Image (cartoon, helix red, strand yellow):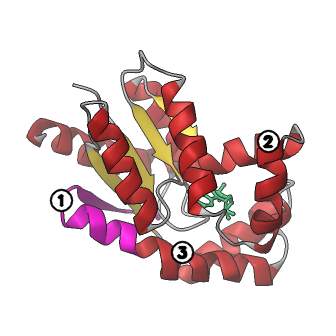
Amino acid sequence: MALNLILFGPPGAGKGTQSEFLTEKYQLVHLSTGDIFRANIKGETELGLKAKAYMDRGELVPDSVTIEMLESVVNQHPNANGFIFDGFPRTSAQAIALDEFLSKKNTSITCLVALEVEENELRARLLKRGETSGRPDDVNPEVIQNRINVYQRETTPVADHYKAQSKYHGVDGIGTIEEIAERLCAAIDKARENA
Ligand code: AMP
């Protein structure tokens, strides 16, 4: 049975850091839509050009572009043990599209693990990260605030979508990297047993 995880949470919650660990531990293919967009911007591809203006403002890239890109990357890994979706889905439409897409492949989301971190902490972490990340969207406080607002408005419905399927597991996102990793693994292992 494939293990398909969604690593969920607001910008700055620690999804990137924790994905590295989870990918290794569960031997999954890591798909970060943000990383893929940034690689495309760097490579000056057509997709990168489409995404850049939205990303620089802290807005979401349109669903049609994002969903098509995600599906094409999943299709490049036919023999994967499973996937860790990091930063996707970010809208209800993306969640519905992902469920349908996986169902056509006779698989499904095993669980969504959410890193819960309050807003003041997110702002501080993102500004700090901006000192070294080289990401234009981590530097400007207005863009950071917009990303948090977009998350509240457009992305929190994704949590409800998976709560309705009893697949949502919230985890306290404050602590050391190891402590948070342990909490995530406990939630994932439990969800896996019940799947
Ligand atoms: P991240 O690296 O996950 O913080 O994403 C950086 C930026 O990439 C976001 O602010 C969006 O502009 C864009 N992005 C990443 N994932 C998605 C997605 N699933 N849907 C729409 N836009 C996305």
- What element does badge 2 sit on? helix
Determine whether, in the image, residue 51 is placed left or right of residue 42. Answer: left
Residue at 35% of width from left, 54% of height from top?
Answer: 113
- What element does badge 1 sit on? loop
Return the residue found at the far top. Answer: 79
Q: Tell me the tag on residue 151.
A: 3
Magenta segment includes 81: no
Check disc 1 and report the residue beneath it. 165
Quarter of the picture for ligand 1? bottom right
The residue under label 2 is which amino acid type?
Asn
2 and 1 marks in contact (CB < 8 Å): no
Check disc 2 and report the residue beneath it. 40
> Can you see residue 120?
yes
Q: Nearer the viewer, residue 184 or 67?
A: 67
- Mark 1 CB lies closer than 8 A to ligand 1: no
Residue at 82% of width from left, 59% of height from top?
Answer: 52
- The region drawn magenta spans 157-174
The residue under label 3 is which amino acid type?
Tyr
Residue at 38% of width from left, 74% of height from top?
Answer: 157
Residue at 55% of width from left, 81% of height from top?
Answer: 119
Other-residue count near label 2 (Cα within 10 Å), few / some / many at <14 / 14–19 / ≥20: some
